[in-house]
Image (cartoon, rainbow, N blue to C red):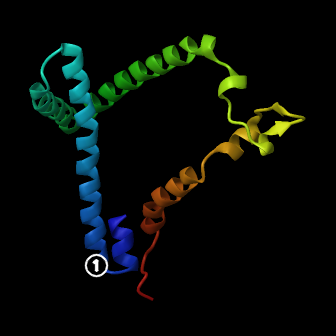
Amino acid sequence: MYGFIRLTIGSHFGFLVGCSEALQNILCVATTVSPIGAMITEMAQRPASYEPIYWILFYISFLCICTANGKTFWIFNRIMASVFLILVLVYIFGSIPYLNYEKFAYRDHEFTKNGEYYLDGFGMLQMLPNVAWYYMGVECLPLAGAVLTDVSD
């Protein structure tokens, strides 16, 4: 994003966007580590004063994994993806007994036929929030910027 903004608007704004992206990455890690520290503290039944220790251990361990050679990083990612996929599947299949469209489904006149709720592929796509499309567009900007050769003309 920094390069795209730098080429289109100017180096000053590119610098500001670069600083904002760095701050975003720092805050993203901080907001990820904080709840993980709270969960580990709760599971270990320790006082809240232990949370910073868990933050540091979590951050250092993932920093080591990310800076390790590529093979170690991708093996770790495959293992984590498998674990999380299993957890999601357990959650989905475990909640099937509690599935109740009549009680919990979103009802709007656009998604009902003769007073009955329907959910087909097109209806599901209509229900997706526009924010997802905005996010996809913003994430495509660096790709668009990569094909620019000279924008000064």
Q: Residue 82, image x and y in percent? A: 42, 20
> Does residue 135 appear left or right of residue 45 in this picture?
right
* Number of on-image labels: 1
Q: What residue lies at 23% left-to-right and 42% top-to-bottom?
A: 30
Question: Which quadrant of the structure image shows residue 100?
Answer: top right
Q: Residue 57, image x and y in percent? A: 13, 29
User: In the rendered view of the protein, which quadrant contains the N terminus?
Assistant: bottom left
Q: Residues within 10 Å of mark 1 (few under 14, many from 20)?
A: some
Q: What residue lies at 26% left-to-right and 29% top-to-bottom?
A: 36
Q: What residue lies at 54% left-to-right and 57% top-to-bottom?
A: 134
Q: Amino acid at mark 1?
A: Ser
Q: Is residue 121 above or below residue 139?
A: above
Q: Residue 74, image x and y in percent? A: 33, 31
Question: Which quadrant of the structure image shows residue 99?
Answer: top right
Q: Is residue 18 above or below residue 54?
A: below
Q: What residue lies at 67% left-to-right and 43% top-to-bottom?
A: 127
Disc 1 target residue: 11
Q: Is residue 140 above or below residue 126?
A: below
Of 88 and 9, the residue lying toward us = 88
Q: Residue 64, image x and y in percent? A: 16, 33
Q: Is residue 111 above or below residue 90?
A: below
Of 45 and 67, the residue lying toward us = 45
